[in-house]
Amino acid sequence: MMNDSKLCSMIQIENFLQESEAIKFQKRFRKEAYSWVEEILQRFHYVILSKVEKGLIKRYLRKVTGYSKSQLTRLINQYHQTGQVRVKEYERNKFKKRYTPQDIRLLAKTAQLHDKPNGVALKKILKRMAREYGQEEYQNIVNISVSHIYNLKKKVPYLRSVSSIKRPIRAKEEP
């Protein structure tokens, strides 16, 4: 961000704010700005400052970072709660996986053993294995839709399972 290590008192910050009235600062990288905000909050012991001094620090942070009041309030609250100011990492929303890798391997094994039938036939085989033969490992995958069978056939665990299951190789006839 900038080297402001010489600023160590409230009077200096107040003078800086008055002198830099015409200067406009630009935002830099978010991680860099957040770590700088954290450094300032630690250096001036923000938690124990008076209300007036906190306002002065907020004005200083706002001037240099260009962040809004609400953004700085969020960062300061984060500092109060955790003792640090960090960029919140993006967390992608994911659907819960219904079929485990074991289910996908079982699907591949069943398909391979029955000479790779189409989706409808494979679904009937899975139902028969679970209901007629009472095999427990088929209980989770028994209600799979035909379209989802085709989706799973494109997935890496399925493709790995199919490639690892070897079919017997016929001997070549010599002329």
Image (tube, rainbow, N blue to C red):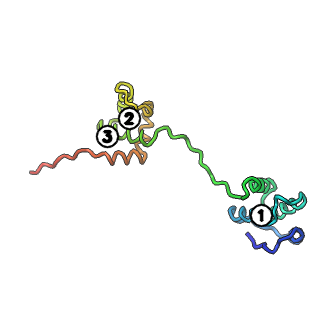
Residue in the foreground of this view, choosing between 46 and 151: 46
Badge 2: how crowded within 10 Å, few (<14), some, or many (20+)? some
Give the number of the disc on residue 112: 3
Cα separation, mark 2 vs mark 3, equals 13 Å
Q: Which badge, 3 or 1, comes first in the chain's sequence?
A: 1
Residue beneath label 1, please? Answer: 42
Residue beneath label 2, please? Answer: 119
Closest to the camera, between mark 3 and mark 1, is 1
Where, by quadrant of the figure, is residue 42 drawn? bottom right
**Tag 2 secondary structure:** helix
**Tag 3 secondary structure:** helix
Closest to the camera, between mark 2 and mark 1, is 1
Q: Which badge, 2 or 1, comes first in the chain's sequence?
A: 1
Residue in the foreground of this view, choosing between 30 and 73: 73
Q: Residue at x 82, y 61 (%)?
A: 46
Q: Is 70 positioned to the left or the right of 127 in the image?
A: right
Cα separation, mark 2 vs mark 1, equals 62 Å
